[in-house]
Image (tube, rainbow, N blue to C red):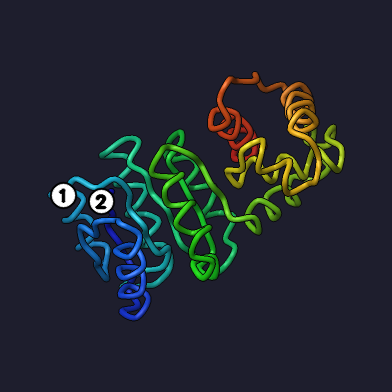
Amino acid sequence: MRVVIAEDLALLRDGLTRLFTAHDFEVAAAVGDVEELTRVLETEQVDIAVVDVRMPPTFTNEGLVAAIDARTRRPGLPVLVLSQYVEQLYARELLRSGEGAIGYLLKDRVGNVPDFIDTVRQVAAGATVLDPKVVAAMVTRLDGREPLARLTAREREVLSLMAQGRSNAGIAATLFVTENAVSKHINSIFTKLDLPAASDDNRRVLAVLQYLRDPE
């Protein structure tokens, strides 16, 4: 699997390069600004781009803008954005860039290497994975609005775990319930949110995220 890394901090950029290499990724390039990222994406075939939100010269949202632009020019390009803080606006902007193959994680998640590598592989395979803190912030923001208000507390937990890219088995293990119970909760969520159930977990996650990103 080929990955491009866009991170302005040399130490973290080098650390990510070593991390990916150690887990059998091929690092096509590791760059420190969006101009280089754009050049790489135009000339190299990569399976996923891992991009810092804040890049030179203003350190605001250059990385995010570059990632969205890349997905405009290459629809479906898997992108995992790393951020220092929970920034709901940036997460929603990324979600609007297309269906699937999107990840948004806080940088401290990189420290949990197995989970981080698993997330990268999920996003590269087409899944949508949001940091648990981002999901919590989104759900809190929408609290009390119909139809989200129809959900029970347990259904909200399941919704949050679905948005984090968890499978039914993963949700069941986290909540200490059976997979059958999880399936019932998911079917109830789709019914209450007026969302069609699908046969595959990724499609169901995307359907829920469609609601989360367009709450109005």
Q: Which amino acid does label 1 sit on?
A: Glu
Q: Is residue 95 above or below residue 15?
A: above
Residue holding disc 2: 2
Residue 182: assigned label = none
Q: Position of residue 2 (x, y in %)?
A: 25, 51
In the rendered structure, which disc, 1 or 2, sits on the residue that comes first in sequence? 2
Residue holding disc 1: 44
x 50%, y 60%: residue: 114
x 64%, y 55%: residue: 132
Of residue 210 and residue 121, the one placed in the foreground of this image is 121
Question: For the residue labelled by badge 1, is the local secondary structure a helix, a strand or a loop?
Answer: loop
x 73%, y 41%: residue: 172
Q: Name the side, left or right, on which 30 lies relative to 104.
A: left
Q: In which quarter of the image is the C terminus?
A: top right
Q: In this view, does 215 lie above or below 82?
A: above
Of residue 174 and residue 76, the one placed in the foreground of this image is 174
Q: Given the current orientation, which residue lies at the most extreme left position?
A: 43
Image quadrant in which you'd find residue 157: top right
Q: Position of residue 159 (x, y in %)?
A: 71, 40
Q: Are marks 1 and 2 in contact (CB under 8 Å)?
A: yes
Mark 1 → mark 2, Cα distance in angstroms: 9 Å
